[in-house]
Image: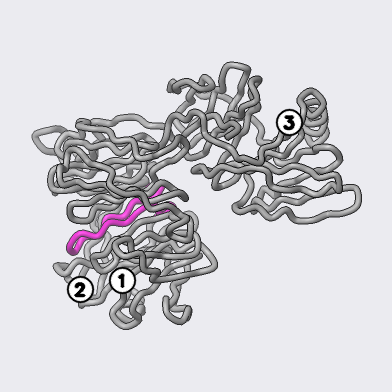
Amino acid sequence: MRKICILICLVFSCLISKKSFGDGLVVLHSAGGQASALAISDDYWYQAVGEELLVLRKNSGAQVAAISLVSAAGGVCTDILLDSDQLYALIDGKEVVVLSISKSNSPLVIERITFDELGFRPRKLALVSGSPVVMGDGGATRLKDGSLIASSDATITSVSNTLNNGIVYVSNRKMYDSINGVFLGSATELAPLESSANAPIGTLVYTRNLEDATEVGLLSGDLKDVDTSKSKVILPGEYSEVVVRGSRVFLATSEGIFVLGIAPKELRLLKTFEQRGVNNIGVLASNYFALSGDFGRGIYRIEGDSGGAGETLIRVVSANGTMGPGQFDNRGVQIPTKDGSVYYGFGDNITTSTTSVKRAETPFDCVVLGSEVVIDEANGVVHLFTSSDETILELASPASTVVAISGNFWFGTDDGIVVYGTTRENKLIELASVNLAGPIVQLIPLLNGTVAFVSEAGYVGVVGMR
């Protein structure tokens, strides 16, 4: 495989003259996107799909409005948060968009907070003691006043205010005191209880991802197990999301939806729904969930009523699922998805099909003018080999693929695309990059000098010179 890649790269380098990408890359076109985060207000269901925020009727899921959230192509909304008459939308790794929902069926963008202003790449939103907070690669900040409430060398995935330890954050499945960085225990996410919950003040719900299973339990105000035998449950599937309402915990994993009841010293599994592929969950009414995931979005009827049978997903609107590298020609690429395939005509819209297609091989090594790079598939680390040396190429995020284009190395990464060129001394220098929701699993050079990309996050596009 490596010999084939080397031959292709050398031929391509000879055919196309080397260009300078020092001014950067820009997304010229993008399409698609997964149904991701959702939030439920008194009257409406807000749903993120790709770069758009959809306003849906709460009782039917019918679309009322669609608002583009991005100021330039290439962004994907991965989280949303309601706070009174404002809605916060996270464009993964790029910015937080603040919208007024004083007219709840017609959100209006009023502010954009970029990662330059935050000082870190944003990844998640949460309410902490009633205040909206954004967290991500290295920090967590209150959005109202811009104050930094936690910092870390790694990505912060959860923040909570605790009874006895103040602000606590989670990074790499470990809880830390935000003031002194003291390790406090293990968790994937922390969720506070509402005041109406049947539990002592200061009790928290925690989740812990156990690869093929998810542990959920109750922690006391000093972050200890409420009861080592009765206050935790292990459920099948990888963790997706947890929602706490009163004395109920609604948990979604890759294997289904689980409803648990909270008692002062006990967490009890009450109901299991075998609905796979759910990434986000909201409570529409006592008998209905709003769901989004690999299937798109839909309403889940819990028990049978006048509308029909229980444990049924209804009013489903499809959206793109996870994408893989596809087979391509000069006009477009046929991309495999979990439920079939999509076709992307370069620079055009995408069309969905239930027909499965073969996944293309992902290149993890490449040669340009005597320099070879090899991506470690296990961790995304890039090894650089020259005639005289072997080194590690430090990228901002793990690499997922590499191709040679115009005599340069183009890397798809977890956070976008980055281009490296070679100097006369056979050293690599970064020439250009663009931040995209990834991982980018395929890069396709086009005849007009632009490059098409496929993101595992469910969208595609074309990038070119700035």
Assign the N terminus to one quadrant of the image. Answer: top right
Q: Residue 308: within the magenta? A: no
SS category of the residue bearing label 1:
strand
> Label 1: few (<14), some or many (≥20) within 10 Å?
many
Residue 406's disc is 3
Chain-order first, disc 1 or disc 2: 2
Packing grade of label 2 (10 A; few <14, some 14-19, many >=20) is many
Identify which amino acid the numbered label 2 is placed on.
Ala
The residue lying at 44 percent from left, 29 percent from top is 31
Mark 2 and mark 3: Cα distance apart in space: 63 Å
* Badge 3: residue crowd in 10 Å (few <14, some 14–19, many ≥20): many
The answer to whether mark 1 and mark 2 are in CB contact below 8 A is yes
Label 1: which residue?
218
Which of the two marks, 2 or 3, is nearer to us in this view?
3
Q: Secondary structure at mark 3?
A: loop
243 part of magenta stretch: yes
Closer to the chain start, of discs 3 and 1, is: 1
Q: Position of residue 311 (x, y in %)?
A: 23, 40
Q: Nearer the viewer, mark 3 or mark 1?
A: 3
Q: Earlier in the sequence, mark 2 or mark 3?
A: 2
Q: Which residues are magenta?
A: 236-255
Secondary structure found at label 2:
loop
Residue furthest out toward the front: 23
Measured from the top left, where is residue 85 in percent x and y? 18, 52
Q: Is residue 266 visible?
A: yes
Circle 2 sits on which residue? Answer: 199
> Quarter of the image holding residue 440?
top right
Q: Could you tell me how far apart the alpha carbons at marks 3 and 1 are, in whole angstroms?
A: 56 Å
